[in-house]
Amino acid sequence: MRHHTFTRTAAAAALLAGSLALTACASSPPAGQAAGELAPVTFALDWAPNTNHIGVYVAQKLGYFAEAGLDVKILPYGSTSAAQLVSAGEADFGIGGQSGVQMARTSGLDVISVYRVTQTDTGRLVVPGDREDLKRPADLDGRLFGGFGAPLYSALAASTIRGDGGEGEFEEVVLDTGAYQALSRGRIDFTLSVSTWENIQAQIDGRPYRAFRYQDYGVPEQQSIGIISSGKYLDERPEQAKAFVQAVARGYAYAAEYPEEAAQILIEANPDTLGAAEELVRRSAELMAKDGYLVSKDRRIGAADPEAWEQFGAFLFEGGFLTDSRGERIAEEPDWTEYYTDEYL
């Protein structure tokens, strides 16, 4: 399944209507909360601030959270994952993509997807753009893969290669974020990247990648970036949850309609980490807005794509990537409709 592109004009009309509706919802505080009183909410990042988080920073800067009766604190990324923090009740919300939710919830963590930031997969298999011997995924058989220590990433690479007629057999070294530097220096032949971030940085550096989209070679679609909460929080504070999710939706709707302004907000909120990366942030925000990553013409903003959850879930199950709380491979595929909700949009 491929993602749909859309024109800025058509998107703007839809976003305007949605923003007006969300504004109406955000005008009063959650039930049980005194007028003028802001309820504290914590939000955990999954990495250093970047354009995946842009709607959250917009909602904070433009007062959408305050209008919804919320005082949101953005927690910096640390050694503990956002999913673990949310499950343990140490964060109310956090960044969590589809496959992460599917694996974490199956393993026993209390997480559920409440908002989908990206409508399609942002991941890509990449090689240096000047490698004439590596023009297609099948050329990567027997080559050296710079991995990130997770079996799923190796499987995405192998499946993409097999989808192009190759064997999907290669050597692997674990390099984490050092994979990008190793690729540019010719120490590895290929790695995986995020099209809305690392690929843009490579272009800025004058060493663009040749990128292969997994879904063009048979890997199922997934909504790779999203926002999670816990079942416990949603049960105990449903009105605050709805206020937060709808304020976030306003933030991402703004970013889709006004990417330049949203990029500036993100940069100003994080001068130490993004002040020297202004071009990257601006180009990334523009790409995410114009290429349909933030908004789909087929669904309201932030909504789940049930087909993507079912098909990528099957990919995880059949590949043996789903384990229970004891670390044992599960014998029956879960009901994926229990892993996400649109109730709070």
Image: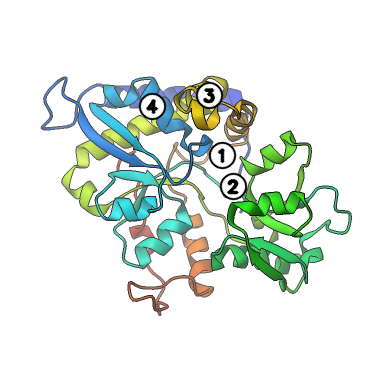
Residue that mark 4 sits on: 59
Regarding residue 124, the answer to whether it shows in the image is no
- Gap between marks 4 and 2 measured at Cα: 23 Å
Assess whether mark 1 and mark 3 are in contact (beta carbons under 8 angstroms): no
Q: Quadrant of residue 218?
A: bottom right
What amino acid is labelled 3 in the image?
Glu
Residue in the foreground of this view, choosing between 7 and 239: 239
User: Please, what secondary structure does the residue beneath circle 1 have?
Assistant: loop
Residue 257's label in the rendered image is: 3
Cα–Cα span, label 2 and label 1: 8 Å
For the residues bearing labels 2 and 1, Cβ distance under 8 angstroms: yes
Residue type highlighted by circle 1: Tyr
Tell me which label, 3 or 1, sits earlier in the chain: 3
Whichever of callouts 1 and 4 sits on the residue coming sooner in the sequence is: 4
Q: From the image, which quarter does the C terminus lie in?
A: top left
Question: In the rendered structure, which amino acid carries the disc numbered 4?
Answer: Ala
| Above or below, 226 relative to 35 | below
Q: Are marks 1 and 4 in contact (CB under 8 Å)?
A: no
Mark 4 in CB contact with mark 2 (< 8 angstroms): no
Residue positioned 35% across, 62% down in the render: 105
Q: Residue 274 shows which numbered tag?
A: none
Q: In the displayed structure, does residue 234 sit left or right of residue 33?
A: right
Residue 303 sits in which quadrant?
Answer: top left
Of pointers 2 and 1, the one earlier in the residue sequence: 2
Q: Which residue is mark 1?
A: 293
- Spatial CA span between label 3 and label 2: 20 Å
Residue type marked 2? Thr
- The label nearer to you, 4 versus 3, is 4
Work out how far the residue at label 1 is from the one at label 4, CA to CA, in angstroms: 18 Å
Horizontal placement of 308 versus 186: left or right?
left
Q: CA distance from mark 4 to mark 3?
A: 14 Å
